[in-house]
């Protein structure tokens, strides 16, 4: 009985030390009222921070933007699951619960920029290098991530971008109809379509990219990611494109995705390449 008590005590201590070493916590993105307005006062912007064990921290961090057509967020398979993955790799991850635009593009953009700034503001305490902060996005979240990568500046500009089956263009008829209407709303003129089409804003200083998608994606035309890669290539930006034979859209962290193992091998190799 005495040995059992000692064992349970030691186990509790071990769990306690593990919890102290590896941290996961939620933070409100803004201390006061959020900039811009989407008309929904109950829609708040938050982040969940995944910090690795301090001794294993690589100094790298990534802000993750889940998808959902700018209508909702797939927070688990395109957010929290990936936060845990990066945490296990010694990479700090910040999963962004951004506000829905409801036709005001500035709403999610301001949230994503604020998340990037939050990471850099806490770089010392989170053991992050100021020059190794990236952004990751899935589907519509990929559009948000690529918008930040191509148009944001200063502390909001990422050092790398990771895009899974991304919406890239806002040109009507070429992107994703739901994302188009939810993001642009009444701001759907050619001027705004071009303004928020990331392939039209690639320059030589756009950060390096990892792009993954499936050939049979029926939700977001594969041309979105392919055309973006071509613009990166044309501007001498380091980028890698992986097009898998099947799997459709929205697989995220699902191990049921037929090419999950290959994708993870490709992705880990890319993370180690710089």
Image (cartoon, rainbow, N blue to C red):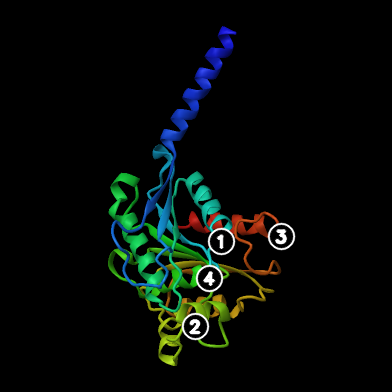
Front tag of 4 and 1: 4
Measure how far apart labels 4 and 3 are at the Cα level.
27 Å
Q: CA distance from mark 1 to mark 2?
A: 21 Å
Q: For marks 4 and 1, give the CA distance.
A: 10 Å
Of tags 3 and 2, the one toward the viewer is: 2
Instruction: Work out whether mark 4 precedes mark 3 in sequence or the reverse, and give the earlier one.
Output: 4
Please determine whether, in this image, residue 82 is positioned above or below residue 3.
below
Q: Secondary structure at mark 1?
A: loop
* Residue behind mark 3: 258
- Local SS, label 4: loop
One can see residue 103 in this view:
yes
- Are the residues tagged 1 and 3 within 8 Å (C-beta)? no
Q: Judge depth for marks 4 and 3 and give the one in front.
A: 4
Name the residue carrying label 1: 74
Pair 1/3: label in front: 1
Q: Secondary structure at mark 2?
A: loop
**Residue at position x 69%, y 74% in the image:** 216
**Circle nearer the N terminus (3, 2):** 2
Mark 4 → mark 2, Cα distance in angstroms: 16 Å
Q: Residues within 10 Å of mark 4 (few under 14, many from 20)?
A: some
Q: Residue at x 37, y 49 (%)?
A: 59
Q: Residue at x 70, y 56 (%)?
A: 256
- SS at mark 3 in the image: loop
Question: Which residue is at the far bottom?
Answer: 190
Q: Quadrant of residue 250?
A: bottom right
Q: Which is more N-terminal, label 2 or label 4?
A: 4
The x and y percentages for residue 119 are 34, 55
Please say if the residues under marks 4 and 1 sit with CB atoms less than 8 Å apart.
no
Q: Residues within 10 Å of mark 1 (few under 14, many from 20)?
A: some
Q: CA distance from mark 3 to mark 2?
A: 29 Å
Q: Nearer the viewer, residue 48 or 90?
A: 48
């Amino acid at each position: 009985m005495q040995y059992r008590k000692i064992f349970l005590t030691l186990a509790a201590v071990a769990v306690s030390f593990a919890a102290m070493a590896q941290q996961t916590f939620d933070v409100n993105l803004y201390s006061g009222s959020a900039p811009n307005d989407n008309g929904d006062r109950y829609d708040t912007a938050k982040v969940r921070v995944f910090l690795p064990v301090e001794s294993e921290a690589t100094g790298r961090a990534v802000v993750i933007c889940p998808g959902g057509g700018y209508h909702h967020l797939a927070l688990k398979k395109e957010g929290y699951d990936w936060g845990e993955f990066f945490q296990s790799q010694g990479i700090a991850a910040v999963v962004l619960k951004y506000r829905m635009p409801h036709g005001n593009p500035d709403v999610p953009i301001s949230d994503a920029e604020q998340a990037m700034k939050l990471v850099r503001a806490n770089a010392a305490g989170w053991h992050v290098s100021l020059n190794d902060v990236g952004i990751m996005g899935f589907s519509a979240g990929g559009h948000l991530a690529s918008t930040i990568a191509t148009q944001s500046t200063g502390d909001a500009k990422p050092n790398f971008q990771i895009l899974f089956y991304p919406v890239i263009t806002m040109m009507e008829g070429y992107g994703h109809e739901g994302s188009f209407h939810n993001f642009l709303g009444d701001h759907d003129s050619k001027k705004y379509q071009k303004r928020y089409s990331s392939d039209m804003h690639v320059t030589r200083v756009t950060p390096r990219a990892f792009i993954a998608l499936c050939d049979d994606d029926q939700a977001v035309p594969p041309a979105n990611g392919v055309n973006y890669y071509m613009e990166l290539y044309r501007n001498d930006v380091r980028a890698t494109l992986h097009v898998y034979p099947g799997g459709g859209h929205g697989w995220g962290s699902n191990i049921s995705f037929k090419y999950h193992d290959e994708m993870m091998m490709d992705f880990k190799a890319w993370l180690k390449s710089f």
